Amino acid sequence: QKAEWKKLKDQPSQTADGKHFTIAANIGTPDDMKGVLENGAEAVGLYRTEFLYMDSSDFPTEDAQFEAYKAVIEGMKGKQVIIRTCDIGGDKHLDYWDLPEEMNPFLGLRAIRLSMHNKDIFKTQLRALLRASAYGKLGIMFPMIGTLTELRKAKAILAEVRAELEAKNVKIGEDLQVGMMIEVPAAAILADQFAKEVDFFSIGTNDLIQYTMAADRGNDGVSYLYQPYNPSVLRLIKNTIDGAHQNGIWCGMCGEAAGDSVMFPILLSMGLDEYSMSATSILRIRSLMKKISLEDVKELANEACYVSETFEDNAKLVAETLKKLN
Ligand code: PEP
Ligand code: MG
């Protein structure tokens, strides 16, 4: 099986009926690029920049950030790289950033909330990103956006940094896109409105499931609730993809569910455009994609969202659908 997968490394990600969907990789540092290239990723769908902050004994400088972002962008040779702004807070901490103790860190001042609360630190990162954008095809992505006001504020700060750089004649990439994670249920519900103000979405199921089910993503005691195939979660995912497509933008997924073999046929049925996963999952999913035609999964999205009642129903539904393929 592994040998069969290896042959797919340089092949495009296509369904049995020849439709292309992008399979991308998630990375934490520029060192992960080796695995990305070895497994034939068609893009980097999520670069988690908080690791740059976590692997450092003080805030990384603008130049250190610029070099890291540029290395990844150049490494992809013109293929798109989505870099997410810092997602500190929740379960991720920095020794050198003295933040108040919180009762509920996952519901607290994390990710974009923290960035906008510390505008200088945020602006330094955005400067590094915009400078690096000149070296390839960059997408800047904001994590944990919950309201349009929050998105507009983040975009306004980006515009401010951009204007400052342009005043100094710093070159900025022409292909630059600006997008947001959909990982807060509030954003998934209003996806049609958010889609009018960004170039792309990437669904973060790790958090979206946690917040939809009110079940800690790392707590084994509630793992029976933390299930990606729950019809409630799937409806939010479908609403996000539909909201994106109705407004002419693309929608990806960078949570763990994007590389899940049971989830994959459902997402394909919903028309998800980009699947971003750990590099070691890419060839497995590409191989699965090759076996499925869109006709095979035509009814799957609606059944999974509106007929199934439990996540177990959906696991069975997908198993039956896949069995019929051969
Ligand atoms: C997610 O929430 O699905 C996601 C990709 O972000 P992280 O796992 O870094 O929170
Ligand atoms: Mg997340």
Image (cartoon, rainbow, N blue to C red):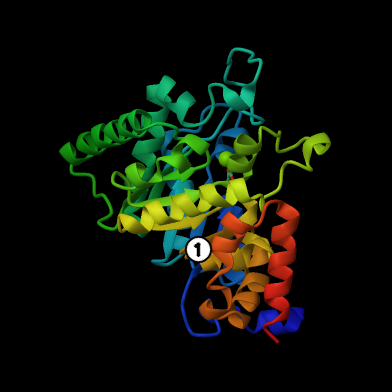
The residue at the point 54 percent across, 50 percent down is 235
Which residue is tagged 1? 270
Closest to the observer: 269 or 183?
269
Furthest-front residue in view?
307
* Residue 94 at least partly seen: no
Q: 250 left or right of 235?
A: left
Q: Quadrant of residue 219?
A: top right
Residue 165 percent location from the top left of the image: 23, 38
Residue lying at 66% horizontally and 57% vertically, measured from the top left: 308
**Residue extending furthest toward the right:** 221
Asked if residue 213 can be seen in this view, the reply is yes
The answer to whether residue 227 is left or right of residue 11 is: right
Residue situated in front as seen by the camera: 291 or 320:
320
Nearest the camera: 31 or 240? 240
Q: Amino acid at mark 1?
A: Met
Q: Percent from the top left, x then y, of residue 98?
A: 58, 15
Where disc 1 sits, the SS reads: helix
Camera-nearest residue between 121 and 106: 106
